[in-house]
Amino acid sequence: MTLRELARLLSWDVQSEGPGLDEEVRGGYCGDLLSHALASAKAGDVWITIQHHANVVAVVQVANLAGIVLACGVRAADGVVERAREAGVSIFSSPDSAFDLAGKVHRALSAEAR
């Protein structure tokens, strides 16, 4: 399932669209510690977090992640969104908790694999 399809299916609010929207999402990573995301998230994962500062853009780039979903209705500041657009990083927002988002992403990707 592509990032665009996943975002549409789960009704995420788009804050920034990167060029990777039509690439396959391989999995997900849920966590708020940037160093742990760098060490543990896998290329192609969608990252679920409440962190919404500019450093998240760099983590996505370095770890080659599919994009970021901000949980609990958190929204990135305008400056972060602008930086994400410049870097080609997709950022979404959802009112769902990180727990619920992780479950929904897992179910969607598992159903797609069948």
Image (spheres, grey):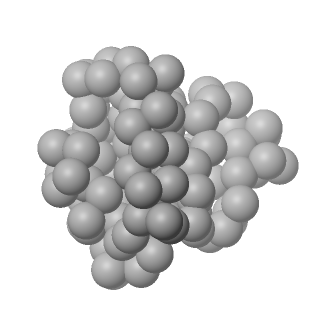
Image x and y of residue 111, in percent: 42, 56
- At x 48% / y 65%, what residue is drawn? 114
Q: Is residue 113 left or right of residue 8?
A: right
Image x and y of residue 16, in percent: 25, 58
Question: Which residue is situated farthest in the front direction here?
Answer: 114
Instruction: Please tell me whether residue 63 is drawn above or below residue 79 in the rendered image.
Output: below
Question: Which residue is situated farthest in the right direction here?
Answer: 39
Instruction: Please tell me whether residue 56 is drawn above or below residue 44 in the rendered image.
Output: above
Instruction: Please indicate, yes or no, whether residue 86 appears anywhere in the rendered image.
Output: no
Q: Is residue 5 left or right of residue 110?
A: left
- At x 50% / y 54%, what residue is drawn? 110
Instruction: Please indicate, yes or no, whether residue 62 appears anywhere in the rendered image.
Output: yes
Image x and y of residue 49, in percent: 50, 32
In the picture, residue 36 is in which quadrant? top right
- At x 40% / y 32%, what residue is drawn? 101
Q: Is residue 114 left or right of residue 65?
A: left
- Of the 4 image quadrants, the one containing the N terminus is bottom left
* Residue 93 or residue 82, whichever sits in front: 93
* Residue 51 or residue 108, whichever sits in front: 108
In the picture, residue 107 is in which quadrant? top left
Image x and y of residue 96, in percent: 30, 23
- At x 49% / y 34%, what residue is drawn? 102
Number of numbered callouts drawn: 0
